[in-house]
Image: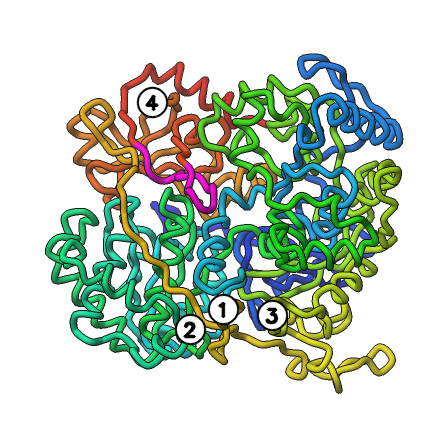
Amino acid sequence: MLFGRRKRKPIVIPEKKVAEWKYTTCNYCSTGCSIEIGLDDTGKLVTSRGHAGADVNRGKLCIKGLLEHELFESPGRGTQPLMRDKFHEEFKPTDWDTAMDTTATKIKEIQDKYGRDSFAVVSTGQLLTEEFYTLGKLVRGQIGTNNYDGNTTLCMASAVSGYKRSFGADGAPGCYGDFEHTDCLMAFGSNLPEQHPIIYWRLKEAKEKRNFPLIVVDPRVTMLAQFADIHLPITPGTDCVLINSMLHVMFKEGLEDRAYLEAHCNNLEELEALVTQDKWAPEHAQKECGIDEDRIRTVARLYAKAGTAMSIWTMGINQSTHGSDGVANINNLNLCTGNIGKPGGTSLSITGQCNAMGTREWSSCSGLPGYRALENENDRDTIADFWKIDPEFFPKQRGLCQTDIFPAIETGEIKGLWLVATNPMTSMPNTPRIRKAMEKLEFLVVQDCYEDVETNQYSHVYFPASVWAEKEGCHTNTERRVNLIRNAMPAYADSKPDFWIFKEMAKRFTERNDIHFPETPEGAFEEMKELSKLPGNYGQQRNLDISGMSYDKIEAARGIQWPYREVDAEGNSTNGSKLKGQHDLKGDPRLYSDAIFPTPNGKANLILVDFVNNNEQPCDEYPFWLNSGRVVEHFHTRTRTGKIGNCNKFSPTPYMEMNPDAAEELGIKHQEYVRLTSRRGDAVVMVQLTQRVARNAVFIPFHFHDCVNRLTLGLLDPYSRQPAFKQCSARIEKIDQAEAARINAERRTF
């Protein structure tokens, strides 16, 4: 009996009659779960389920994946192209040819008047890989602007930068299977149960079998921290101090893997000289990072003495002014203990978006497709020859990152912008500054599945894009596994697949370069395969080699990790429509198992990381650390999950975690509204009292419009240009509850 009731109403799961199941891949986070979506006998999508035969998720899905089929007819979907002369005017419906002709004309006018780089393009981590490749071909090969980037700068740029600095190339060297082999795992700023629930399930299952020590470094008592053997509640932004102090202990006590370091790493003497300085001794480092000296020594010894040890991290490391240094230092930690390229020993960046890896691999945002660099003449010549254009059309170095594009709008350097599946009005730090920048644009194109996305209020042209399984193509997940999205539904109303939009736009720029664009995503994939097998730099094989893959093989295997070369595919060819079993279709699970790195001398680089604390610190005027992050029910700016009732109902409103002792001092009660203020702006949030945050800290989910990013500072990492979303200071003020409720309702309404 519950609460005095004698009869409980039973839970009833309504029957959903499925006539056909179609294979696809989840389009939310980077886990890469294989999904089957069920269609009824009228062709309507009615349910989703995890694919039991997929190695990644093994039949499991999180709440977002289970409800993903509801996206297709969710409110706010774009139904037709829209245009207007001024952003404050009403939109008028138009046809695709008119919208595209107008856009192409405006791009050319702006470039003719102000220069080729005066028009910028900002993409996403949500498209399919073939769409990224096609957009990059259009931008790099025809439009010609060098100011082209993706919103992955906000989440993964520091991981990319750190991998390149340490190993010579991007690409996570490990895999989820390493959980099953490791003897010690250290998680930096990663809350898997809410960020990546299925990866957490894989980790939890492995730990239950082998009970290895789990160490979590996070200023907040996250769900993962609650399950940890050791929780290190670090001072925000000081991870590099902690790692240098751990390295100090290892070198002073002779715990480093000296043989591996001498054989396979550059800069050993310089790194050892740096980290053995007295300032990195635990008794001194503890005053900076907030972890006591005995605990630092314990963790350093535990990690160094483990048979194998691995590190994972997410935004707690990346979203910092020391993000790239933090990643490079985690790589130092694993190189110094010989934990790269072997089962259970790795540096594994847990990626954010579903296809942020595809962006990094093939979009040409930061260079040219296939991890090629604009700065490398051979790479420019290779792509120019493949696309049959003049290599002089390419710039010789990378242009502005996303986080530098918006300041360039402020200064008048950039006059026009094309946004593809990204929502900077909610996702960028310092929202008031972004709003002013958007108002200055002479021309803005927004391409999105949802017409009501917040940034669309400033656009002149709106392209309605198709969602997820209304398209066909591939994703690459955190562990470099390429998986397939099959087309399950026709495009909604008059929306179009992003691949079609880019291909059609390319027809309007043929006077610059008349490049061949394949008619289908599979045709683009075949081009990518050819590019991937061309020789790499330094006489080495290219790790990013997908030449042995095909759509049918990927589906049969439920995803294949790269490298998977033509030679690997021998014997795994199709026999009619029948393929060999999944066990025959596996790429390499790990990189650098041979200890050969894509650097000039084939060795990894130990990076010298000193630390200058340039974080905004709590003070008398703003006494609280402000931290932000994800909750399990939502994804990014709620453009999708805010429309799904069973996701939104669990977190329908902006809230702030606050320590009860701090709240008592300020006379604030549980579930009251408060006004949170920083040097940039203010936000109204509901208070949730919890011991998960320190007395001088608060935490706010970043998903809500006009909320936490009105407050964030967004200082940039000098290498990656990624913003420091998680380190700034704020103060808390009481507010009229009725007015606060009105503001709250207004800001969470679509």
Q: Earlier in the sequence, mark 2 or mark 4?
A: 2
Q: Which residues are magenta?
A: 716-728
The label number, if any, that marks residue 406 in the structure image: none
Q: Earlier in the sequence, mark 2 or mark 3?
A: 2
Residue placed under numbered mark 1 in the picture: 173
Please say if the residues under marks 4 and 3 sit with CB atoms less than 8 Å apart: no
Spot occupied by residue 246 in the image (x, y as percentages of width and height)? 23, 63
Residue placed under numbered mark 3 in the picture: 543
Which of label 4 and label 3 is nearer to you? 3
Residue placed under numbered mark 4 in the picture: 679
Q: Name the kind of residue labelled 2 in the image.
A: Ile
Q: Name the kind of residue labelled 4 in the image.
A: Arg
Left-right relation of 6 to 475? left
Q: Secondary structure at mark 1?
A: loop
The furthest residue to the bottom: 571
Spot occupied by residue 628 in the image (x, y as percentages of width and height)? 38, 40
Left-right relation of 721 to 693? right
The residue nearer to you, when weighing 725 against 247, is 247
Q: Secondary structure at mark 2?
A: loop
Q: Name the kind of residue labelled 3 in the image.
A: Asn
Tell me which residue sits at (73%, 56%) in the image: 381
Q: Main secondary structure of the magenta part?
A: loop
Tell me which residue sits at (41%, 79%) in the image: 181
The number of discs equals 4
Spot occupied by residue 492 in the image (x, y as percentages of width and height)? 79, 41
